[in-house]
Amino acid sequence: MQIGDYVRAGKIAAEVREMVRAKDWVGKTVYDICEEVEREIKKRGANCAFPVNTSINEIAAHYTAEPNDPITIKDTDLVKIDLGAQINGYIADTAVTVCYDAQYDALVQSAEEALGNAMSMIKAGVKASDIGRTIETTIKQMGFKPIANLSGHSLEQYTIHAGKSIPNIWSIGGFSLSENSAYACEPFVTTEQGGGFVRNGQIKNIFALNSRKKIKNEEADRLLDFIWENFNMLPFALRWITKEWEEKKARELLEILIKKKAIQAYPILIEVNEQRVAQAEHTFIPVEEGVTVTTRI
Ligand code: MN
Ligand code: MN
């Protein structure tokens, strides 16, 4: 456990997140946003822990730009920009919702408030289910709905979802936070008309290595090596391999590797009633004196 690397990655992720929050993205394509945000992370001396997610409106999570993706942000859109920085595999995972339509300010605010209230109660020994209760209560008091089947998670070196979940609703059982372990807390919230759940969509544009076992296809195996060397077990996007492989070829090879289960593809997640979703996220480590929120400015 390298607290120093977690803290350094966190500072970088927080700086970039605040840049994202302050900027007017209307008229920009999701491709431009992803590339610019990823450049800002690298410029500060970290690597990307995963492709920047730009999930618009009823898409709650897991959309990243395709190569030259033309989707353009409108002034009525609500965009979750979720970004990750890593140093030696120690990850900072943080998100902000940007929206230029005042109608949705309260929705965005409720995700931020829920996260703030959750952060205020963190110390070693706190039950994840009690964090979930705080998030749920905060969101409902503001007249909105938490997304019940999305949750925060424990983090480990080169592993974003390391097995433990921090729910966004109260739930029976669960675990208690350990000192010097890293976690992400990420309330997702939708409107009263929302179902409060997400379903898988058709689009899959985030991938990760499943297995390094060769599949005996020379080019596909070369891509497998490239992925391991550059991204380890962390998620990646097609954009990240089209500097080495032509786009059409890269898609073909990815398809082969997915069929052989060497690579997994993550579907986008959509609110079941197609209502808008807002998100806020911090990474934190319970320490002896309380908590270090690595992604807090
Ligand atoms: Mn995230
Ligand atoms: Mn996360």
Image (tube, helix red, strand yellow):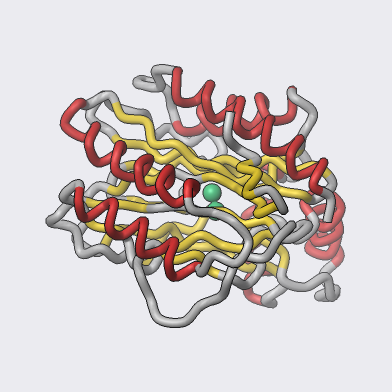
Q: Quadrant of the N terminus?
A: bottom right
Q: Quadrant of the C terminus?
A: top right
Coordinates of residue 41 in the picture (x, y in percent) = 68, 30
Name of the residue lying farthest toward the bottom:
173
Q: What residue appears at the point 57 percent right and 64 percent down from the top-left corner?
A: 265
Relative to 12, 215 lies left or right: right
Choose between 148 and 66: the one closer to the eye. Answer: 148
Snapshot quadrant of residue 4:
top right
- Tell me how many marks there are: 0
Q: What residue appears at the point 74 percent right and 23 percent down from the top-left corner?
A: 43
Coordinates of residue 82 in the picture (x, y in percent) = 51, 42
98, above or below 110, in the image: above
Q: What residue appears at the point 76 percent right and 57 percent down from the top-left corner?
A: 158
Relative to 132, 239 lies left or right: right
Residue 32 visible in the picture: no
Snapshot quadrant of residue 271:
bottom left
Residue 265 visible in the picture: yes
Coordinates of residue 231 in the picture (x, y in percent) = 77, 51
Snapshot quadrant of residue 172:
bottom left
Name of the residue lying farthest toward the left:
193
Q: What residue appears at the point 67 percent right and 59 percent down from the top-left corner?
A: 155
Choose between 195 and 155: the one closer to the eye. Answer: 155
